[in-house]
Image (tube, rainbow, N blue to C red):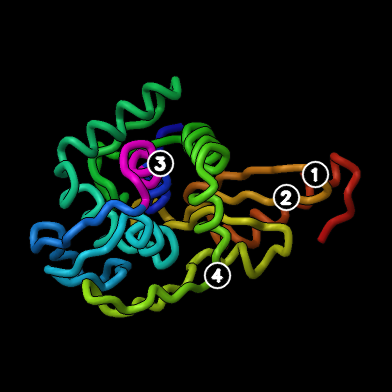
Amino acid sequence: VQLAPASLAKVLTSLVALENFSPDQAVTITPEALGQSSADTLMHLKAGQTLTVEELLDGMLLPSGDDAASAIAVDTVGQARFVAAMNAQVAALGLTESHFTATAGLDDPGLYSSAHDLAVIAEYAYQQFPLFARIVDTRTITLPASALHPAFHLHNLDALLQDYPAAVGVKPGWTGNAGACMIGIAVRGGHHLLAVLLSANYPAQLEGRLFDWGFQLDGLPPL
C-alpha cells in the first residue's frame, strides 16, 4: 500500500549519500539548503558552516534534521539530481511502490512508499554500510567544534532504542499526513528481525510487541 513515509525517507537519502559520497567529503552549507519551518526537526545548521557527509548523516538520522537532509543534496549535486538518484536507487533495488520528490520526507502528494519498499531500503543500507548501522544505533553524540563549525549535541529520537533492549535502530518519523511511522531492527540470539510501521499509534511500543512475537517464533522468550 502506497503511503506517506514521513522522515523514513531519510533512510533512502542516507543510502544515496553513502553510495555516492565519501563520508569525509566536506559540504559547505548555503542559504539555499536552509529556510525550514520552525516546526521542522532540525540539526540547526547555519549558512557558511562546513561539515562532512558523515556529520550530516549524524544530524539527519539522530535528531532527524530536515536541514541536514536538504544540505546533503542541495550543497553537493543539487536537489533535482539527488532526488533523481533516490528514485534510480529505488528502481535498482527492484522496488515499484515508491516515488520520492525530496530528501526530508515532508508531506507531498508525489512522495510515497510502502512498508515493503522501506523494509528493503533499510535492510540494504544496514547490511551494506556499517557506518549507517553505527549511526542508527547511537543514542547521543557530540560533534566537536572545529574551525569550520560549532559543536553539535545530537540526540536520537528513536524511542525503540530505549523501549526494546534488543533494538539496534533504525528511524522514526511523523507528519500530519503520514502519522507516526517507524523502521526498526532488533537482534537476539543470532536472529535479525526488521519491522516497518506506517500510520501507527505509539510505534515503538508496537514494534516491541512485533519483535517479541517474531523472536518467540524462533524460540526466544519475550523481553
- Pick whichever, 32 or 50, lies toward us: 50
- Marks 2 and 1 in Cβ contact (< 8 Å): yes
Tell me which numbered mark, 4 or 1, is placed earlier along the sequence. 4
Gap in angstroms between the C-alphas marked 2 and 4: 17 Å
151 lies left or right of 204: left
Tell me the kind of residue under disc 1.
Gly
- Pick whichever, 4 or 23, lies toward us: 23
Seen at 31% across and 69% down, the residue is: 43
Secondary structure under tag 2 reads strand
Q: Magenta residues: mostly which secondary structure?
A: helix
Tell me the kind of residue under disc 3.
Leu
Judge whether residue 17 is colored magenta: yes
Secondary structure under tag 3 reads helix
Gap in angstroms between the C-alphas marked 4 and 1: 23 Å
Residue 12 lies in what quarter of the image? top left
Q: Position of residue 16 (x, y in %)?
A: 35, 39
91 lies left or right of 135: left
Secondary structure under tag 4 reads loop
3 lies left or right of 167: left
